[in-house]
Amino acid sequence: MAQLKALIFDVDGTLAETERDGHRPAFNQAFADAGLDWHWSAERYGELLEVSGGKERIRAFVQQSQPNFVLPSDFTDLDAFIRHLHATKTSYYKQYAAAGKIPLRPGVERLLNEAKAKGVRLAIATTTTPANVQALLENTLGPNSLDWFEVIAAGDMVPHKKPAPDIFEYALAHLKLSPENCLAFEDTNNGLLSATQAGLKTIITVNDYTRQQDFSDATLVISDFGEPDAPFHLISGPAGTANYFDIALAQALCTA
């Protein structure tokens, strides 16, 4: 029987509604600062989320929608310009996080605290940058919250981003644990593919951008982690009598 030893979390859309409340407006502000007339609507951004990684998302947008794009005169390299845009966007994202504009999703803080109290190890596996992870955690959970996570696998630490399994494999290797002893938490089909290819049972918490995606390979699909006085909505999978996600349910799913 597998024993639950660690929880591995995606960040964007899983821990917080970062895509809606942080990344999209930060991208748009970065575009405005650069004198571009680009604006990513909620609908367009939802389409671009099929591409993992912020820099990769900008490149896909240029290739798909800006065939006649001309680089600003002080840039001769598209890669450098994308890095510049992304750095500006990250600065705005950090400002939004510091201003409290990116709250955690329901049940996240409760679940993390219960895991710590019960000796279940914590890790992060995300395509967002380490700076974004730090900004979100420190401004929602406190200045020492980075230390809650034994491994923070983020950004460009691995050769291939989700849906490749690299980032979860990196987290598992640094935890020195087998997939059978861990659960992954995601919100997108790309994240689900990444985690399951790494051998991890995966819990999905959907959001407005992802609720129509295919999560048939997930162990459990729920609206959010829920709270005792605000139950989650069960979409698919075995939750038993649970109406919010806790360590008891995590252990039951791990051993099932």
Image: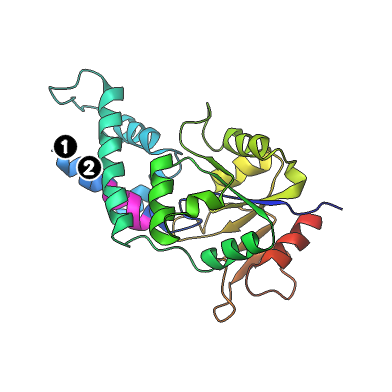
Q: Which element is circle 1 on?
A: loop
Q: Residue furthest bottom?
A: 229
- Toward the viewer: 212 or 10? 10
The prevailing secondary structure element of the residues shown in magenta is: helix
- In percent of width and height, residue 87 lies at 29, 36
- Graded by Cα atoms within 10 Å as few (under 14), some (14 to 19) or many (20 or more), the crowding at tag 2 reads many
Q: Which element is circle 2 on?
A: helix
In this rendering, position of residue 72 left or right of residue 250: left
From which residue to which does the magenta span run?
Answer: 20-26
- Toward the viewer: 27 or 37? 27
- Dots 1 and 2: beta carbons under 8 Å? yes
- In percent of width and height, residue 159 lies at 52, 26
Instruction: Please state which amino acid type lies under the numbered disc 2.
Output: Ala
Q: In the rendered view, tell whether residue 178 sits above or below residue 94.
A: above
Which residue is painted at 65% across and 63% down in the image?
117
The residue carrying mark 2 is 30
- In percent of width and height, residue 234 lies at 63, 69
